[in-house]
Amino acid sequence: MDRLTSNLKRYLPNSLFGRALMILVLPIILLQAVVALVFIQRHYDGVTAQMASSIAREINYAIDIVDQAEDADDARRLMDQLSAPLGLELGLSEGEAVAPSALREFYDVTGGVIVETLRDEVSQPVALDMVSFEKLVDVRAATSKGVLRILIPRRRMNAANPHLLLVWMSATAVLLTGIAIVFLRNQIRPIRELAKTAAAFGRGRSTPFRPAGAEEVRRAGAAFLDMRNRIERHVDQRTNMLSGVSHDLKTPLTRMKLALAVSDDTLETRELSRDVSEMEHMLAGFLAFARGEGGEASAPTSPIELAEEVAHDARRRNAQVSVFAQLDTPENPVLEMRRHAVKRALANLVENAVLYGERAAISVRLTRKFAEFIIEDDGPGIPADQREEVLKPFTRLDAARNQNETPGTGLGLSIALDIARSHGGSLQFDDSQRLGGLRVTLLLPR
């Protein structure tokens, strides 16, 4: 059962519009098929059998007249007299035999009913030809004077224009289905807009959105807007609160620095001054991590130019940084992103790379679906079992990075991960095949 379900899901449409359209169209098609089948097999076939039975009685009457005639000439004279009243073209051929047969097109549905009715009700063997003449049926029947040939108008065996009912049914169904598709598309559009807006918000873009459509869709849209507003208010409140905390903490730190500046230069004052500087550095790093870049608007930016800019800034600090670029979409070389935020994330990754290694490389790849920034170094790397741990705020690996010798507060990777997630992307760690150290991949969707 599970296998059957999985196979069905493979061929069913994935989108809501496709599934709704299938739910709408399939019953109409099945209804048309059932009505057509019932109409053809019961009504149309029944009418055809009745009309063919009437023709069979006229053929039997003509056969009896021929058999009762004195000779073939007398039979032909009687046939000429019968043609007009019966509305048939009658002829007699001497010396021919009739082999029961039926020639008809494969798509002639009612032709089989005509053949069966004439064979059952005509008293003599008959041969039918429904192909040679477009609107006539050529019937040949055996008599005692020869072969009786009868040309019967096809309209006398079939209801006139029976296909019109099916044509009108099909045309009406197509018209109503088209109208329903238009209305269905209008109902699906607000859901698509809601999904598009939600995806954009997940990537840090606050796009305009107005709830529309059915009541349930409007309520879902209003709930999303309410949720987005609450999240934005929460971010603003957190930023303002941390800004106030930063301001309040900087005041006593400034007083401590002034007191240390006028104090005697001793070992204790130098150590205390270093502690104060470290506290300021940690406070600035924490504020930057908590605040992020939420207030920045997204704009089209060239990832390659951004990587070159980050590498140039690192080279100004005497770092060895190289850049490699691959552009798969030359017609669209930009990506919608918060430029300063992504630059901050790349700068943090490059700073870590050149801090714990001698060389670093930035590889940029821009495809139709994503932008990939790869930062590699020749440093000691990060053990595979600790790569999740280093993404936590204020986490540093003492075994590989001595806190007394290297600056930082352990927020660089956390800030980069936060920026990647705010764009709907990810941050991944691996071993560098090019330089032998750590390989960090910042992946952003387009």
Image (spheres, rainbow, N blue to C red):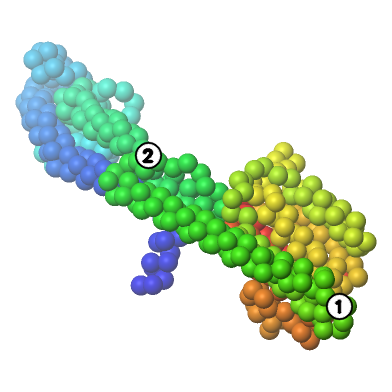
Which mark is nearer the camera, 1 or 2?
1
Based on the displayed image, in which of its 4 quarters is residue 131 positioned? top left
Tell whether 280 sits left or right of 406.
left
- Asked whether residue 48 is in view, the answer is yes
Badge 2 marks a residue whose secondary structure is helix
Q: Tag 2: Cα neighbours inside 10 Å, few (<14), some, or many (≥20)?
A: some
Expressed as whole percent of the image width and height from the top left, the position of residue 295 reads 59, 50
Residue drawn at x 86%, y 77% is 264
Q: Tag 1: Cα neighbours inside 10 Å, few (<14), some, or many (≥20)?
A: few
Badge 1 marks a residue whose secondary structure is loop
Expressed as whole percent of the image width and height from the top left, the position of residue 26 reads 30, 47
Front-lying residue, 437 or 365? 437
Tell whether 85 sits left or right of 368.
left
Expressed as whole percent of the image width and height from the top left, the position of residue 58 reads 9, 27
Residue drawn at x 17%, y 39% is 39
Kind of residue indicated by mark 2: Arg
Residue 264's disc number: 1
Which residue is labeled 2 in the image?
A: 185
Residue 238 vertical placement versus 135 (above, below) = below
Expressed as whole percent of the image width and height from the top left, the position of residue 267 reads 86, 84
Kind of residue indicated by mark 1: Asp
Residue drawn at x 90%, y 67% is 359
Residue 14 vertical placement versus 330 (above, below) = below
